[in-house]
Amino acid sequence: MESYSLKEIQVHIKQTEYRPKDKQASFLKLVEEVGELSEAIRKDSRMTETKSIKGTIEEELYDVLYYVLVLANQYGIDMEEAMRLKEEIKQQKMAKRKVEDERKKLEDSST
Ligand SMILES: [Mg+2]
């Protein structure tokens, strides 16, 4: 089975999406798919049990990802770059939290 990078999936969607300009329609579809994901999670519908992707958490997670990437394309956003920037912020927060936790431990041990 082939594997794809996030960028390859985003490019594929850009080349095949039939409504490439309608941002509001894409956002409404994203919300609709989140609702379908909610139902699949509530039913705990997994592919291993149904032998088909239809109506499963697997299908609905992909549908959500699909419309996230459709919107990214419509706004001209490179999601790999967005991920890189967000991960930088996350790493900074984690490093700051680690320093704070160590300082707190030192304070607690000295009292
Ligand atoms: Mg769906």
Image: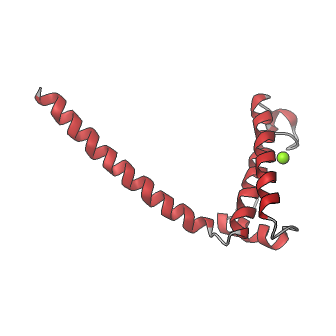
Q: Residue 60 at x, y = what percent?
A: 79, 45
Going by the picture, which residue comes out furthest to the top? 111
Q: Which residue is at a point 81% across and 73% down the rendered structure image?
A: 15
Locate residue 94 relative to residue 51 in the image: left or right.
Answer: left
Q: Quadrant of the C terminus?
A: top left
Q: Residue 72 at x, y = what percent?
A: 68, 65
Q: Which residue is at a point 18% across and 29% down the rendered structure image?
A: 108
Q: Which residue is at a point 55% across and 68% down the rendered structure image?
A: 81
Is residue 18 positioned above or below 53 on the image? Answer: below
Q: Where is residue 21, by image quadrant? A: bottom right
Q: Quadrant of the N terminus?
A: bottom right
Q: Where is residue 71, by image quadrant? A: bottom right
Using the image as rendered, state which of residue 29 and residue 108 is in the foreground. 29
Q: Residue 55 at x, y = what percent?
A: 86, 40
Count up the numbered dots.
Answer: 0
Q: Which residue is at a point 73% across and 71% down the rendered structure image?
A: 11
Q: Residue 76 at x, y = what percent?
A: 67, 72
Using the image as rendered, state which of residue 56 and residue 101 is in the foreground. 101
Going by the picture, which residue comes out furthest to the left? 110
Is residue 9 positioned above or below 96 on the image? Answer: below
